[in-house]
Image (spheres, rainbow, N blue to C red):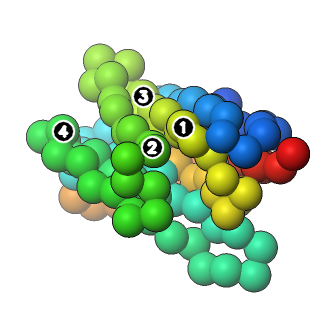
């Protein structure tokens, strides 16, 4: 059983920064990628950023140049550094771990960007 625990969300002013963390516990077999998705009210869940087991990264166009995904493989933890935040970044952010066999999701952490 794999469990994901997210932290780091909150309220921040436009232009500010936040760092999200997601620690995965349990037996992760055949890791493919770790990533962050977000879902704003009334919208579908969308990919924000992902990082593969070979540390290849991928970003949504809307966050390129502002967000950075990284991981600590020894700790099974993935991070999302979010800079120059905009009101349109407001959403619930979900951590995802994808293996060859399963997709695992965190409970979500709220990020609100407002003045």
Q: Closer to the N terminus: mark 3 or mark 4?
A: 4
Task: Give the secondary structure at mark 3.
Answer: strand
Q: Are marks 2 and 1 in contact (CB under 8 Å)?
A: yes
Q: Please state if 57 lies on the left or on the right of 11 as rendered.
A: left
Q: Which residue is mark 3?
A: 77
Check disc 2: other Cα within 10 Å, few if <14, some if 14-19, many if 20+: many
Q: Closer to the N terminus: mark 2 or mark 4?
A: 4
Q: What separation in Å lies between label 2 and label 4 (alpha carbons)? A: 16 Å
Q: Return the residue nearer the eye: 9 or 67.
A: 67
Q: Which quarter of the rendering shows the C terminus?
A: top right
Q: What separation in Å lies between label 1 and label 4 (alpha carbons)? A: 21 Å
Q: What separation in Å lies between label 2 and label 1 (alpha carbons)? A: 6 Å
Q: Please state if 82 lies on the left or on the right of 52 as rendered.
A: right
Q: Which residue is mark 1?
A: 83
Give the percent coordinates (x, y) of residue 34: 35, 46
Check disc 4: other Cα within 10 Å, few if <14, some if 14-19, many if 20+: some
Q: Which residue is mark 4?
A: 55
Marks 2 and 3: which is nearer the front?
Answer: 2
Task: Give the secondary structure at mark 2.
Answer: strand
Task: Give the secondary structure at mark 1.
Answer: loop
Q: Is residue 108 visible?
A: no
Check disc 1: other Cα within 10 Å, few if <14, some if 14-19, many if 20+: some
Give the percent coordinates (x, y) of residue 14: 72, 45
Q: What separation in Å lies between label 2 and label 3 (alpha carbons)? A: 17 Å
Q: Which residue is mark 2?
A: 67
Q: Please state if 16 lies on the left or on the right of 35 as rendered.
A: right
Give the percent coordinates (x, y) of residue 23: 50, 30
Task: Give the secondary structure at mark 4.
Answer: loop
């Amino acid at each position: 059983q794999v469990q994901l625990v997210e932290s780091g969300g909150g309220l921040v002013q436009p232009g500010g920064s936040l760092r999200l963390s997601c620690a995965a516990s349990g037996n992760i077999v055949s890791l493919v990628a770790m990533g962050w998705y977000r879902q704003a009210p009334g919208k579908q869940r969308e990919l924000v950023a992902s990082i593969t087991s070979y540390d290849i990264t991928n970003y949504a166009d809307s966050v390129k140049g502002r967000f950075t995904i990284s991981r600590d493989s020894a700790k099974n933890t993935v991070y999302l550094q979010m800079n120059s935040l905009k009101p349109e970044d407001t959403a619930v952010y979900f951590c995802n771990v994808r293996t060859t066999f399963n997709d695992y999701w965190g409970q979500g952490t709220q990020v609100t960007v407002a003045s």
